[in-house]
Image (tube, helix red, strand yellow):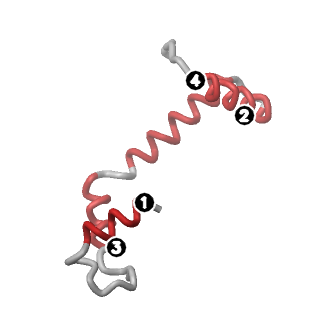
């Protein structure tokens, strides 16, 4: 193992301690497991895969508005206001 030092927010520290206690493992092990999960997720999201998923999603959903492309900016602004 390689020793390293990290800083957690107070909330992160409390949550990691709670998970460690409930799981009967060390805080270090909780953090290592979290890093492993993140790295697996990152490895599964290659740029090509993200592009492929985006292309498959294009056109699959309907907003119910007939002027979506010509009034895109207006619809987007309204969506972010809510």
- Considering every residue shown, the one lying at the far left of the view is 70
Q: Nearer the viewer, mark 3 or mark 4?
A: 4
Q: Earlier in the sequence, mark 2 or mark 4?
A: 4
**Mark 1 Cα-neighbour bin, 10 Å: few <14, some 14–19, many ≥20:** few
Q: Position of residue 39 (x, y in %)?
A: 44, 39
User: Residue at 61% of width from left, 28% of height from top?
Assistant: 12
**Mark 2 Cα-neighbour bin, 10 Å: few <14, some 14–19, many ≥20:** some
Q: Earlier in the sequence, mark 3 or mark 2?
A: 2
Q: Earlier in the sequence, mark 3 or mark 4?
A: 4
User: Residue at 73% of width from left, 29% of height from top?
Assistant: 20
Q: Nearer the viewer, mark 1 or mark 3?
A: 1
Residue bearing the label numbered 2:
19
Whether residue 13 sits left or right of residue 18 in the image: it is left
Distance from Cα at disc 3 to Cα at disc 4:
37 Å
Query: What is the secondary structure assignment of the residue under circle 3?
Result: helix
Residue bearing the label numbered 3:
57
Query: What is the secondary structure assignment of the residue under circle 4?
Result: loop
Q: Nearer the viewer, mark 4 or mark 1?
A: 1
Residue bearing the label numbered 4:
9
């Amino acid at each position: 193992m390689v020793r390293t030092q990290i800083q957690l927010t107070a909330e992160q520290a409390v949550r990691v301690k709670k998970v460690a206690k409930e799981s009967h493992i060390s805080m270090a092990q909780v953090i290592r497991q979290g890093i492993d999960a993140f790295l697996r997720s990152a490895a599964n999201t290659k740029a090509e895969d993200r592009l492929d998923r985006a292309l498959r999603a294009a056109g699959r959903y309907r907003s119910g508005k007939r002027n979506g492309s010509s009034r895109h900016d207006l619809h987007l602004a309204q969506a972010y206001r809510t």
